[in-house]
Amino acid sequence: MLEKLHQANLIALQIQETEIQKYVLKNPHKLDAELLRLVADQWLARQKAKHKLPSWFTNQHVIFPPPLSVEQASSEITANYKAAVFTRNFGSDKCADLTGGMGLDSWALAKVTDSVIYIEQNAALAIVSKYNFGVLKQYNIEVLNENSVLFTQSTMGVVPHQTITNFYIDPHRRDNAKNKVFKIEDCEPNLLEIKHLLPNFMVKFSPMLDIKLAIEQIQNISEVHIVAFENEVKELLFVSERKNISTIEETNIYCINFTSNNEKQVFDFNYKNEEKSIVKYSQPNTYIYEPNAAILKAGAFKSISAHYDMAKLAPNSHLYTSDKLVKNFVGRSFICESVCKFDKKEILSNLPTPKANISTRNFPIKPEEIKKKLGLQDGGESYLFATENNEKQKIVLICRKVDLT
């Protein structure tokens, strides 16, 4: 198997500047159907990995799993972040990755721990991952082709289970029909069935999961990390230490957003302080702020207002305002140039060009419908926020981004 994958990878590297669809249709090297498919897979996987997994992409000997696996995998920057969170909580002792997959998380963990046991029940994937670990010169990873549940239940193995106290889990989130699932009990392995076997663990779940419900179900969660990349939430991480008994109200919630230039926006809070925070409401002032996606997912609506001493437009609008610029805000900052009613003539008269970037917050009409109704094109330097103020009036804010350079 590895020999054929090597061959496919070599051909894929040679045709990186070629359009893969044309190559497959013409098949100039007269490859057999299986090899042609593998070449296409390697070509597509490498394209997806170029910016997402730079260390893997630049190593021409790395063999990639199918493109969908690369698409679903963490980015290198988020994998390294997870590894840092893992060791900050559990230390650098030997650990086990119960859901090895393409091996990215095991590789990241191995860089900051003594060693990692990579466990994967798919034999083909385990073989490729073992090869890649060697290519990447990460020699402190032991590969086991085994079922993760059986491993946790066993007291024997290549390494006795008793020596492992720290575990990483990224449950498979597709059912037998390959449909996406996100509930804890629908994922494989089902953490709720094995959590009692794991002294300390960090588990990754879908951004679709309800955070408070997950804390209640898993129990004893000390930290939750909502990780976003370029303002899109990619994963939820739950940290559980058996020695650290925490309630939902006490759990530390970390909102992380990696920007396009790899800067890290960080905001942390807990639900106890969120409930106690006092929020001021105001009509739109000079500056308008939109929290990043991680904060919105976490529900830190009062905490963000209190932390930055800024007013909110309305309880459910989740847009904030101030007279003075908050330079370190964890999200996007705008100058408000006009406040309009939802009226075509008024809005267009205040727009410098018939182009705008449209967002809605607590508004009954979707951005596409607004764009059509106003006859606008996407883009330009104007940003329209269709929202509601604290007097329940529908308003449209015409803004431009703050230049923070």
Image (tube, helix red, strand yellow):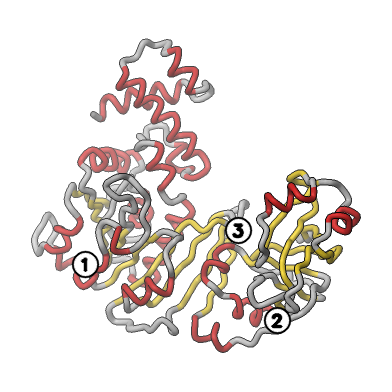
The location of residue 281, given as percent across then percent down, is 73, 81
**Type of residue at label 3?**
Glu
Is residue 202 rendered to the left or right of residue 317? left
Q: CA distance from mark 1 to mark 3?
A: 38 Å
Secondary structure under the numbered disc 1 in the rendered image: helix
Q: Which image quarter holds the C terminus?
A: bottom right
**Type of residue at label 2?**
Asp
Q: CA distance from mark 2 to mark 3?
A: 23 Å
Location of residue 129 (image quadrant):
top left
Query: Mark 3 or mark 2, which is nearer the start of the sequence?
Result: 3
Q: Which mark identifies residue 396?
A: none
Residue appearing at x 65%, y 71% in the figure? 318
Secondary structure under the numbered disc 2 in the rendered image: loop
Q: Which residue is mark 2?
A: 309
Residue appearing at x 49%, y 45% in the figure? 52
Q: Nearer the viewer, mark 2 or mark 1?
A: 1
Q: Which residue is mark 1?
A: 193
Q: Nearer the viewer, residue 280 or 61?
A: 280
398 up-or-down from 37: above or below: below
**Type of residue at label 1?**
Glu
The location of residue 261, given as percent across then percent down, is 62, 52
Residue appearing at x 21%, y 73% in the figure? 196
Q: Nearer the viewer, residue 218 or 183?
A: 183
Disc 3 residue crowd, few under 14, some 14–19, many 20+, Cα 10 Å: few
Q: Which mark identifies residue 263?
A: 3
Residue appearing at x 56%, y 89% in the figure? 276
